Image (cartoon, grey):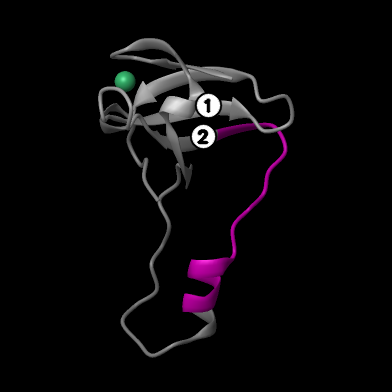
């Protein structure tokens, strides 16, 4: 799989580290352990199809990217710097 880093160009995915879905999660309020915290830490969607993901280019520019990837075919459709994407982050 190749990822088109906006700064480095088209690179092998082994230069990157996957860090999860590129979504802003609602963190539960300050409280003792609760079902809300259990869900926040352990439960994630597992969509089939186009998904925005956070990838770190550790063997390249060190930048954080939002990569749009089809989770069924692994086709990479786009890659943008996370700083340029509103609401990105886990
Ligand atoms: Zn890069």
Residue 68: numbered disc: 1
Rendered position, 33 above or below 58? below
Rendered position, 33 above or below 83? below
Residue 54: numbered disc: none
Indicate which disc, 2 or 1, sits on the residue closer to the N terminus.
2
Q: Circles 2 and 1: CB distance less than 8 Å? A: yes
* Furthest-bottom residue in this view: 32
First to last magenta residue range: 37-51
Which residue is located at x 49 percent, y 37 percent?
Answer: 53
Q: Judge left or right: residue 13 versus residue 65.
A: right
Disc 2 residue: CB within 8 Å of ligand 1: no
Task: List x then y, in percent, for residue 16.
Answer: 42, 30
Mark 1 nearby-residue class (10 Å; few <14, some 14–19, many ≥20): many
User: Which residue is at the front of the view, 53 or 26?
Assistant: 53
Rendered position, 89 above or below 84? below
Rendered position, 4 above or below 83? above
Q: Which residue is mark 2?
A: 52
């Amino acid at each position: 799989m190749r990822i088109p880093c906006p700064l480095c160009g088209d690179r092998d995915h082994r230069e990157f580290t996957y860090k999860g879905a590129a979504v802003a999660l609602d963190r539960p309020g300050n409280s003792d352990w609760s079902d809300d915290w259990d869900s926040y830490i352990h439960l994630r969607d597992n969509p089939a199809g186009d998904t925005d993901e956070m990838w770190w280019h550790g063997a390249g520019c060190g930048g954080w990217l939002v990569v749009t990837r089809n989770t069924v075919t692994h086709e990479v459709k786009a890659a943008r710097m996370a700083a340029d994407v509103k609401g990105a982050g886990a």
